[in-house]
Image: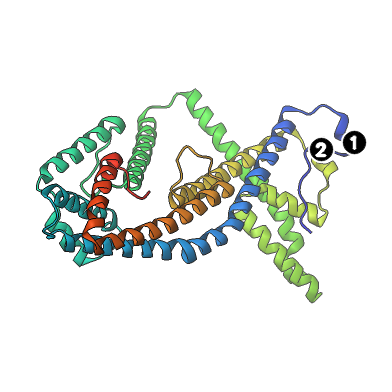
Amino acid sequence: MKKTLNPIGATGAGADRLLSKGQKAFNALIARIEKRRASLAEWEAFGPEFQRRYNDEFEPLKAEFDTVRIQMVQRLDGSYGEKALTKGERQTVADLICYFAELILPSVDDPSLAEIYERYKAPDADVEAEAMEDLRNDLKATFDIDIGDDVDLSSPDDILRHVQEQLDKRDEQARAERAAYHAKRKKTPKQEAAEERARAEQAEIHLSIREVYRKLASVLHPDRESDPVERERKVALMKRVNTAYASRSLLDLLEIQLELEHIDQAALENVGEEKLKRWNAILKQQLSDLDTELGEIQLSYLMKSRMNPMSSVTPKNVKRVFTAQITSLREHVKLAERDMRVFDDIKRLKPWLKRMKFELAAQHNDHLFD
């Protein structure tokens, strides 16, 4: 049965005594690590449900919506030559064809759609190119990075991804340059002593976690067990020990010790300050690794669900936003199918084009159905 560490001083004879700075830090780190683990477990449980809904609901709806919008472009193309349409209405038809095609083409490979788009693409492409160049220059001025021609400036996701990649590369390069600069500088005796202390501390940290590992490995070695049932249990425990050691998870190793009753809460209460200092350094790194893993998961769901980057990214919030998106997408499919019927009657098509003209003007660069 898996056991978890209690905070130092929470139980037993140590409950009434004052805690040292190291003991308080140990308790805080254990609590924060357990909180991160709970969050990761929540995401792990949420993942299959999200993926199922993404595959079974969102993707089919997205494909259906794309199909309807392609049909819409085709019907608009067919209606462009209607004699009853005015010059302004034909311009609206052309604008709608370009608008829908530009929304669909980045994610759908449809040569016929691309051919229609090329025919109706606005002749003032230079104006659009100038606007894109202005956007490129604004981004460069804001972030001090170059935006290459391979970046789709009409896609906020692509822009965000590219900017983040460039900022990460810049940070990495800066760190490398700082390291190279410091490596070239002649170190003072004080600096050399500090580096030697840091190396010694890292060696002590490694020895601390290795000490716990070796004790467990010695007890759990399957070859030393004659009972088949007990050997199987030890094999399973040894796998956990090896996994914990590979990931430098001191907390997992200590908890396995608790399970085997090789250490108890009373022993933790009396761990020396030097050993506690080394343990805390290991736990800080473990917490940092968990934060990195959690951040990557949250960023992944933020992009998949297209949430506001300033929102709190939790399974509950992602589920709420994603459910709303599926509902909205389903409604948009129905609305698009309804709008398709206006092409059967020119008397209905003309007022529809008038309404769509105003909607295009109101939307500006926002997606019409987002």
Is residue 101 visible in the rendered structure shown here?
A: no
**For this view, does 235 lie left or right of residue 329?**
right
Q: Quadrant of residue 45?
A: bottom right
Residue projecting furthest to the front = 347
Crowdedness near tag 1: few (<14), some (14–19) or many (≥20) residues, C-alpha within 10 Å: few
> In the rendered structure, are the residues bearing label 2 and label 1 in contact, judged by CB atoms less than 8 Å apart?
yes
Of labels 2 and 1, earlier in sequence is 1
- Looking at the rendered structure, the secondary structure element under dot 1 is helix
Vertical comparison of 164 with 217: above or below: above
Front in this rendered view, residue 355 or 52: 355
Q: Can you tell which mark lies on residue 13?
A: 1
Q: Quadrant of residue 104?
A: bottom left
231 is higher (above) or lower (below) than 151: below
Q: Which residue is under mark 2? A: 269
- Identity of the residue drawn at 66% across and 43% down: 35
| Residue drawn at point x = 46 percent, y = 52 percent | 325
The residue that appears at 38% across and 37% down in the rendered structure is 171
- The disc placed on residue 267 is none
- Return the residue found at the far right: 13
180 vs 193, nearest the viewer: 180
Q: Position of residue 165 (x, y in %)?
A: 35, 44
Q: Give coordinates of residue 353: x percent, y percent.
A: 23, 51
For the N terminus, the image quarter is bottom right
Quick check: 97 left or right of 16? Answer: left
Name the residue located 54 percent from the left edge and 49 percent from the top edge. 320
Out of 42 and 330, give the one closest to the viewer. 330
Amino acid type at mark 2: Glu
Query: What amino acid is labelled 1 in the image?
Result: Ala
Dividing the picture into quadrants, the one containing residue 170 is: top left
Is residue 5 visible to us here? yes
Q: Position of residue 46 (x, y in %)?
A: 58, 56
